[in-house]
Image (cartoon, grey):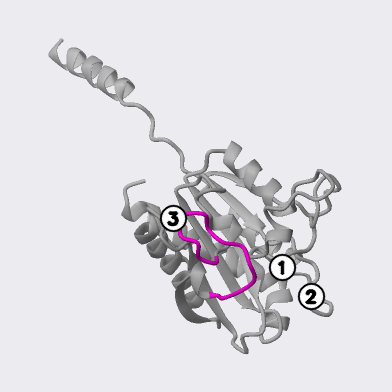
Amino acid sequence: MKRIVFFLLLIVCVASVPPRKKTVVVWQPSHQTNTGKNFSEAAVCNGIAEAAMATVPKMKEHKVWSLGRTDVHTADVGSNTVVAHTSAVVDGKISGYAWEILQSNKKQPDIFIAVHNNGGTRRHAVWGYIHYGDAYEAENRDLAATLIASIAAATTLENRGVLLDSTTGRNDYRCASTGKLSFFSLDEHVNTAPIRVLLEIGDNEMSYDFLRDPANQQKIGEAIKQGLSQWLEKRGK
């Protein structure tokens, strides 16, 4: 009888424990197609993001991608650091970047990961970028460092570390709080995800053949998911 009571109490206790909330992750592969001769950054980054999403462990994952849309401007081109390509409204249309972030915000993600390729660096490398002055700057830096370390360990890409988006010195999009140059998709005034990182994976000239190889895209995507999983486990999530 005591044993039966014990098991009944155990069942009640287990049933009363709320299930662990699944981490919600949004992937934003680049939609840029004008990034070099016979090189589509959009195709490369989408291949990487799709590989990451297909790799276990599975989470609540979503992809936001404006490629091919006709109801936004600069859907297939544009820079993440230019007002005209991001926050500007043209002929009543928001930008592809703005549409992607709006879709992301609807998913209420815990983590937002943008996937891009670099250019003009003369380096076969990987970089992580985070937003300057962010309340979650330390967590963002730790995640970005974990992801690029995982990519570098799985590939021939050199680990060039984590940088602040304010250090690029590119173009004219600025954060309203700091007044610093920044990446539109990492701006806390635009993107509501608490954890937001942007990965620059390879260089469209120095890593040309490497990045276009589907096997390498698969390897990179798997490495990103493994790094993300390790980072979450370290935090008990």
Q: Earlier in the sequence, mark 2 or mark 3?
A: 2
Give the secondary structure at mark 1. Answer: helix
Magenta stretch containing residue 174, yes or no?
yes
- Residue at 79% across, 78% down: 36
Q: Earlier in the sequence, mark 1 or mark 2?
A: 2
Rounded to the nearest angstrom, the CA distance separating label 2 from label 3 is: 30 Å
Which residue is denoted by mark 3 in the rendering?
Answer: 229
Which amino acid, mark 3? Ser
Contact flag, marks 1 and 2 (Cβ < 8 Å): yes
Name the residue type under label 1: Val
Q: Is residue 165 above or below residue 68?
A: below
- Mark 1 burial class by Cα count in 10 Å: few <14, some 14-19, many 20+: many
The residue at which mark 1 appears reads as 44
Residue 28 lies, in percent from the top left, at 63, 55
Towards the viewer: 227 or 187:
187
The residue furthest top is: 1
Q: Residues within 10 Å of mark 3 (few under 14, many from 20)?
A: some
Where in the figure is residue 94, as x and y percent of width and height? 75, 47
**Residue at the bottom extreme, as displayed:** 122
Q: Which residue is mark 2?
A: 39
Magenta part, dominant SS: loop
Q: x%, y% of residue 97? A: 69, 54
For this orientation, the residue located farthest to the left is 2
Magenta residue span: 168-181
Helix, strand or loop status at disc 3? helix
Q: Which quadrant, please, contains the N terminus?
A: top left
